[in-house]
Amino acid sequence: MAGSQDMFDAIVMADDRFHGEGYQEGYEEGSSLGMIEGRRYGTLHGAKIGSEIGCYQGFAFAWRCLLHGCTTEKDSRKMKVLESLLGMIQKFPYDDPTYDKLHEDLDRIRGKFKQVCVLCVSFS
């Protein structure tokens, strides 16, 4: 009788055992896939940010070369804003993805770029 009781217990408890094993396997696979997807997303997002900042930097370098040697007061103001943008870009933490103010700094760079565009591209 004790042997048949153990057999019935094994059958009744199989659902719990399989549920636990399935959960553990699913958790491990999900963790692995999550790491892969997160790494892929981080690489893509980081590349987009780097490309955006590189575009701003190239724009600022080009305008700095164009304004080099200009001596009007307007041109000196443009140079000052350009140098400010280049300084912000130079200080941007490219190699620290855990930097907690990364998006705030990126927004400041975007704002400064807009200011540069208004000053440099205006024809007045």
Image (spheres, rainbow, N blue to C red):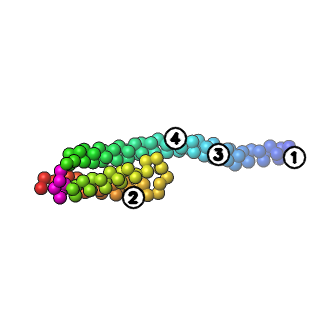
Type of amino acid under label 3: Gln
**Residue identified by numbered label 2:** 104
Q: Which residues are magenta?
A: 70-75
Examine the image and state in which quarter residue 4 appears.
top right
**Residue identified by numbered label 3:** 24
**Labels 1, 3: front one:** 3
Circles 1 and 3: CB atoms closer than 8 Å: no
> Do we see residue 106 in this rendering?
yes
Query: Along the polypeptide, which appears first: circle 2 or circle 4?
Result: 4
**The C terminus lies in quadrant:** bottom left
**Crowdedness near tag 3: few (<14), some (14–19) or many (≥20) residues, C-alpha within 10 Å:** few
The label shown at residue 36 is 4
Q: CA distance from mark 3 to mark 2?
A: 39 Å
Examine the image and state in which quarter residue 33 appears.
top right
Q: Secondary structure at mark 1?
A: helix
Q: Secondary structure at mark 2?
A: helix
Q: Residue furthest right?
A: 1
